Image (spheres, helix red, strand yellow):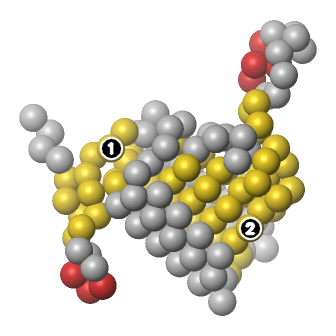
Amino acid sequence: GSSVFDSVHVLGQVEVGEQVWVGPFVMLDGSGAHLVIGNLCDISAGVHIYTHDTARRCVSLGAASILTAPVTVGDGTYIGSQAVVHPGVTIGSQCVIGANSFVNADVPDRTIVVGSPARPVGRVEGDGDEITFVYANSN
C-alpha cells in the first residue's frame, strides 16, 4: 500500500513501512547504515535522508573517516518539501518536519520542527479527526 514516485533514488539498506507516500525527487540513502521509515508517513518532494556524511573526510584531506549512522522515522510523520535529514537522527512518531528544514538532532514524538537547523516550534495534539497543531508563543 505504499507509493514511491519513479524519480525517487533508493540506495543501500532502506526499509519503508505500509501506506507510506514518497514524493518525486526524494533521496533515501541507506548506503551508510540502515534507514527505516515507519508506517503512514508522507515524504514530500525533494526530501533527502542520508545515513552518511563525507564532509569531515573531505576537509581533512582524507585523514578523517566518513560519518555513518542509522536514521529512523516513526509512524505517521510528515516531512515537508526539500527537508534534509542528517545521519544518526531519530524522528519520532506523528511529527511534522517543516519544508526546507535541516534536521540534525533527534525529534521527539508529536513535535513540529522548522528551520535550518530544525528547532521545535509546536506540538501535535489529539487523536483521529481531532488532531491539532499547537504552536509555541513567539514572544
Q: Residue at x 57, y 59 (%)?
A: 73
Instruction: Count residues near mark 2 (Cα–Cα under 10 Å), then give few for <14, some for 14-19, many for 20+.
Output: some
Figure check: 48 above or below 54? below
Q: Which of 8 and 92 is in front in this view?
A: 92
Q: Farthest bottom residue?
A: 1
Quadrant of the image occupied by residue 62: top right
Quadrant of the image occupied by residue 23: bottom right
Q: Residue at x 67, y 40 (%)?
A: 87
Is residue 64 among what the camera can see?
A: yes
Position of residue 19 in the picture relative to residue 113 (left or right) = right
Figure check: 44 above or below 53? below
In the picture of the structure, the residue carrying the numbered disc 2 is 15
Q: Residue at x 79, y 48 (%)?
A: 33
- Which of the labelled discs sits on residue 120, or is there none? 1
* Distance from the alpha carbon under mark 1 to that under mark 2: 26 Å
Q: In which quarter of the image is the C terminus?
A: top left
Figure check: 71 above or below 129? above
- Hey, what amino acid is under mark 1? Pro
Q: Earlier in the sequence, mark 1 or mark 2?
A: 2
Q: Nearer the viewer, residue 16 or 97?
A: 16
Q: In which quarter of the image is the N terminus?
A: bottom right
